[in-house]
Amino acid sequence: MVSWENVTKVFATDLLKSAVVALDDVSFSLREGSMTGYLGANGAGKTTSLKIALGFTAASKGKIRFSPVLGASPKEALARTGFLPERPYFYPHLTGGEFSDYMGALSGVPRTSLTKRRQHLAERLKIDHALNRPLRTYSKGMLQRMGFLVAVQHDPALVILDEPLSGLDPVGRKEFKDMMGEINRQGKTVFFSTHVVSDVEETCDEVVFLRQGKLAFSGGVADLMARHASRRFRVVLAASPDACWDTPTVSSLYHAGVWTLVVEDAYREGLVREAVGAGAGLLGVSPEGASLEEIFYGLQS
Amino acid sequence: MNTWHVARFTFHEMVRSKIMWNIPVLGAMMALVTYVAQEFTYGAPGRVATDLGLAALTLCTYGIAFFAGSNMIRAEADSRTIYLIISRPVSRTAFLAGKLAGVGVFLLLNIVCLGGIYLALMASLGGGLTPEVLTAVAFLLLEAMLLLVVLVLISMMANLALTLIFGAVLLIAGHAVAVSHDILWLNRMPWLKEGLRVYDWVLPAFHRLSFKNYAVHPTHFPWDMVLPAAGYGVLYSAAVFGLACLVINRKNFD
């Protein structure tokens, strides 16, 4: 859908100081119809790479390539793209409805279809009661919802969201994630940056990791998890508390009639045979994998 | 079409802001000062009202031009609203033109409202709306538009403090250069005089757009200068707008 091709961004800070490399030869692409999380610590270059993609700032080297699906020209591609910047602060004296009208008009959406779609989205985002109020009276969470509304009201094929979940309460985060999932299920490509790894693990099928301006990983969440999966298995058994096993285990835990044992792959079958032979009930066997969060911290360090 | 949308909502936003309070406040001050001043003026209360009215109108219009011009693009970048606009199929040139048009219409509204108060004052003093005053007010709008575009151009290359300083220096110098030939020691330095002549043609010569003094003394109104001055104002503003378009199209909004 969009490709970052060898994108480098260098900021000249001061005449006497050396330039800062914000992005260093970054290449990755977004698959059409995917929900991709964009992870990286503060200053990793996430926002800069989004700004380059949307044409706010120029890359020092490299280029952005939009798929023909989005349009033949950058202008057409922008017309089919929705964007929510990080911590937006909108025009304080316009009402929510006027702001939506403004953004809709710039996207070339006819007024009648805009009104219908806005009403639907506002109800879903629970800001329909505030559309006639000036934006200066909105709370931070409401502004974030309003930003999301105007980012998707023109039915874009690609939605880019910069830290959309920051500043939201847990209920708001859940609703936002549900909305992003809903939009993605409609066939839209969703790309959002976040610091919260569990949000990506929960909602995304693809992930891009940036580390100090360099690409650390780009691909499927499942691929990444599989790549970092350990060769250990978790065997869950129903057995008495005094049961003991000859097969070597990495760890064992008993709670309320259930044993949870972690074994190396080589001992997995032996443990299962031993347990079943001893009359224990086999409740499950599953690979013991690292969470995305653990992988993220591993990649960070 | 996008220029129209940007202009419309820029105007909406400005009309509802606190800047609008300048109209009743300045209007009341104008009325009070005119009333007090004409009490001390024997035989020419209308001229005093004209002078004070145009001065108040000028100060207010400059104030709005400085406020809007120095903040127009910066405020959009600070609040990240510019990202919402230029991430849509809107060219930066259309965005800039729309913002300037929106502020321009606001300046016009401001001039019309304050001008209305001023006319009411004039009527109460037995005066009326003269072609000289109307011309001076129309040129005030042109002058404010030129100042606005100049400030927008500077604001895209300098910080707020420098924008205000450069803007004020250009405005003052653009008026002062007209009277430079009256200064005796300048006449003794031909190279400096030549420099000022070049300045007068290269940098914004705001004095060319100022007919306020002539409006107060209408017997000497230079009608033959009106058309060239209007041409200068429009062409110079267009040239600065062109430069501003070049800058905004190359500017990185990091």
Image: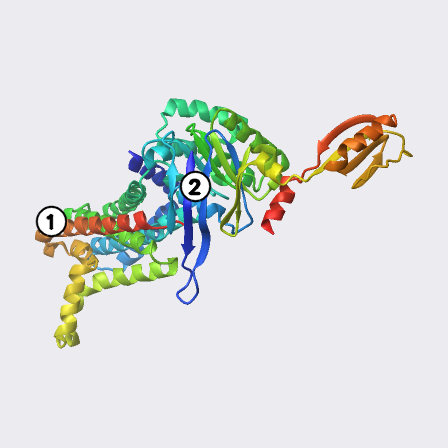
Left or right of B242 on screen, residue A131: right
Tag shown at residue B227: 1
Q: Residues within 10 Å of mark 1 (few under 14, many from 20)?
A: few
Q: Which chain carries label 1?
A: B
Q: Which amino acid does label 1 sit on?
A: Leu
What is the spatial separation of the Cα atoms under label 2 and label 1, in whole angstroms?
A: 39 Å
Left or right of A104 on screen, residue A39: right
Q: Nearer the viewer, residue A234 or B187?
A: A234
Instruction: Provide the residue designation for mark 2.
Output: A91
Q: Nearer the viewer, residue A35 or B106?
A: A35
- Residue at image position (58%, 33%) is A203
Where is residue A186 drawn, in percent x and y? 49, 24
**Looking at the image, can residue B87 be seen?**
no
User: Which residue lies most toward the left here?
Assistant: B224
Where is residue B87 drawn, in percent x and y? 39, 39
Where is residue B97 drawn, in percent x and y? 28, 43
- Residue at image position (28%, 63%) is B169
Q: Mark 2 lies on which chain?
A: A
Q: On screen, A271 above or below B20?
A: above
Q: Which amino acid does label 2 sit on?
A: Tyr
**Looking at the image, can residue B75 be seen?**
yes
- Residue at image position (37%, 27%) is A109
